[in-house]
Image (cartoon, helix red, strand yellow):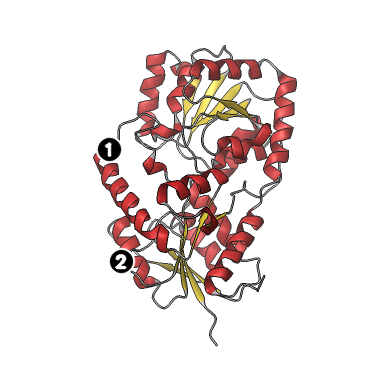
Amino acid sequence: MPRPRIVIDGRYGLRNPRRGVGEYVYQLLKHLAALERPYDLTVLGDASAAPDVVREVGALYPVVIRSAPNFFWWEQVVLPRAARGAALLHGTANLGPLTTTLPQILTIHDVIEWHRGREFPGEIAFRHKVSRFYRMNALRRLAPRARAILTVSRHAQDDLAQTLKVSPERITVTPLAPKPGVMRPHFPKAPYFLALGALDPRKNVMAVLRAMTRVPEPWRLKVVGAEPQALPLWGRRCAELGIAGRVDVAGMVSDDRLADLYRHATAFVYPSYYEGFGLPVLEAMAQGCPVIASDRASLPEVMGAAGLAVPADDPVRLAALMAELAADRPWQVILAHEGMVRAASFSWAHTALLTHQAYLKALGLAPEA
């Protein structure tokens, strides 16, 4: 008999550079390749795929690239057509096609759209309102009929079970992990804090900027990962706050550069309002970087006792914690080592194994209990 074929939505994992969902897809594909599988995998990507990543992943599985005028057309027309004849379709980025009869597994990273605008501030652009309407309504229809649902934290499991009205028993938690590699902490730490600069209001970058007005010199702030349109905005905000000379803002940086920034930073500051997982927290800890993050959503679950929790809406408390840590080098060393131990307890191999087991169950190939 022919082996069953699983088609994986690999769009975000085939990009370079990648954000959180993309890193999940990329690492999942790499680590599934190490498992003995009674099924075949095909990876589907779009025009945003980076040629070097396509070559790398293509050495492991067939990779099919298909273009579409927009993400809606790709998800609802191109994806089901390309997956025709498959035994299972894995939607890795919260969604899948609505009209296909193919059995589906969904990775739902979060249900943030139900929280946006209610639990944290920020204007929503018209284009995003349209996308939000589509995604919320599609998820309401897809989640109840999916063969299985994967998510990335216990918090996300509880949140989407309550929001989408599905039983928690149908949801498998497959935690994320830091990038594999040698962990090389650096001491003494350099006099700067590191933050991520995405425009999304839930990332709460303004809290970090406001906190920096209370952090003494010579400490600086380095902000990376800002979208091109965010660069002038953060520049103006820093000027308004009187800290323009102490803040460096950059766009996406390479993995090696980001790892180097983590290793040398006094701390990584991440006062996000909402995260399904919060992968940057583990990425920082893996490099021996102390972490200060908000006490909301999944972040306390990911940090454990190895990070410092602070209210997301209290930049004064955040500034006090940053200043206290800056002045206490032994505390920096303790937090760095505790964070490395915490990060090492997560692995992509485990994520891949849990996903593989979900595939077997969905295909009816799981061994009898």
Q: Image height check: is 98 above or below 269?
A: below
Q: Residue at x 67, y 15 (%)?
A: 327
Residue to which mark 2 is pinned? 77
Q: Residues within 10 Å of mark 2 (few under 14, many from 20)?
A: some
Q: Along the line of sight, which residue is nearer the eye, 218 or 24?
A: 24
Q: Is residue 257 above or below residue 6?
A: above
Label number found at residue 22? none
Residue under the point 73% across and 39% down: 341
Of the 4 image quadrants, the one containing the N terminus is bottom right
| Of 271 and 361, the residue lying toward us | 361
Residue 56's x, y, as percent? 55, 62
- Element type at mark 2: helix
The amino acid beneath tag 1 is Ala
Query: Along the line of sight, which residue is nearer the eye, 323 or 38?
Result: 38
Is residue 322 rendered to the left or right of residue 100? right
In percent of width and height, residue 201 lies at 39, 32
**Element marked by disc 1:** loop
Q: Is residue 152 visible?
A: yes
For the C terminus, the image quarter is: bottom right
Furthest-bottom residue in this view: 1
Residue 228 occupies quadrant: top left
Q: Residue 285, image x and y in percent?
A: 65, 37
Which residue is denoted by mark 1 in the rendering?
125
Q: Amino acid at mark 2?
A: Val
Q: Is residue 363 above or below residue 302?
A: below
Whichever of callouts 1 and 2 sits on the residue coming sooner in the sequence is 2
The answer to whether one can see residue 187 in this image is: no
Q: Is residue 329 left or right of residue 351?
A: right
